[in-house]
Amino acid sequence: MDYIPNPLIIPIGIIVGILIAAPVGPVNVLCIQRAIERGFWGGIAAGIGSVMGDGLIALCAGLGVGTISGAVETHRAIIQVLGGLALIAFGTRLYFTAPRLRIVSEAESSSESLKDFVWDIPQTFFLTITNPGAVLGLFAVFGGVSTFVEVHSTIDVLLMVAAIVGGSMLWWIALSHIISRYRHQIDLRTLALVNRIAGLLLGSFGAILIAEVIWKGGSF
């Protein structure tokens, strides 16, 4: 019977995945900017990086890898500073980057694929796994999920992780599709404003992370 997973895991995992992906944070800002600038596949590529990061963290949490949670707490200051510096770097680059709005014909659009934007994946993956809040948050989520559905066996854990990843990916597919349908109404001037706002938000998130470490007198 241990090989038969709890069927309630799937819908709950999908809901958790959507709830994890939906809130506006630094990674979400970057993913949305990529979808506006580069279209559907640009948003999907950025979303995949975020989903892969969340999936890896969720897998470690589900398997009870407490050493990872402990390591994050122990070295939280340095991880937070690295993540903050990365956000500031991404934000600064985005703020000063000249807008490049990719408007393509239907024929060109049909020939585009994920491989055209594959280098966006490691960027959002790195930003996700260097966010201590995301790591500890997912560990907490797995603890809270047990109040709704039993997750005991390895099969249950793997199914829950797959459902969370699936829910997050559904969110990014839907959001990228919506943005891609209306992005043609955006001109370069508006995109430049979007880039600056996104850059300022990313930089602000990074500065807040670093400021929190300084304020608490974090030890490296």
Image: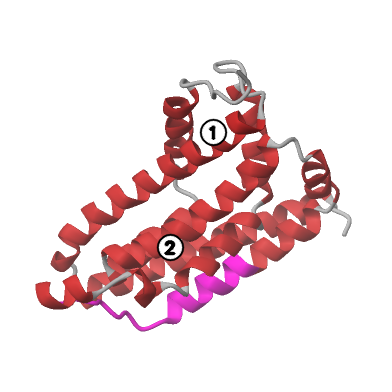
Secondary structure of the residue carrying numbered label 1: helix
Quick one: SS at disc 2?
helix
Residue 160 is tagged as: 1
Q: Amino acid at mark 2?
A: Ala
Image position, residue 129 (x, y; %): 64, 56
Q: Which region of the structure is painted magenta?
A: 86-105
Tell me which residue sits at (62%, 69%) in the image.
86
Q: Residue at x 11, y 76 (%)?
A: 107
Within the image, what quadrant is residue 203 found in?
A: bottom right
| Residue 58 location (% of width, % of height) | 61, 41
Vertical order, 133 against 50 (above or below): above
Quadrant assignment, res 60: top right
Q: Please state the horizontal and vertical placement of residue 183, each as a whole percent of the image.
A: 20, 64
Q: Is residue 93 magenta?
A: yes
Q: Residue furthest bottom?
A: 98
Tell me the residue that label 2 is attached to: 46
Q: Pointer 1: residues within 10 angstroms few (<14), some, or many (20+)?
A: many
Circle 1: residue type: Met
Classify 10 Å Cα crowding around label 2: few (below 14), some (14-19), many (20 and above): many
The x and y percentages for residue 7 are 46, 21
Residue toward you, 9 or 185? 9
Q: Quadrant of the N terminus?
A: top right
Can residue 141 be seen here? The reply is: no
Q: Residue 167 or 155: which is nearer the viewer?
A: 155
The total of numbered circles placed on residues is 2
Q: Which of pointers 1 and 2 indicates the residue nearer the eye?
A: 1
The numbered mark, 1 or 2, whose residue comes first in the sequence reads 2
| Residue displayed at 25% across by 74% down | 112
Q: Is residue 92 magenta?
A: yes
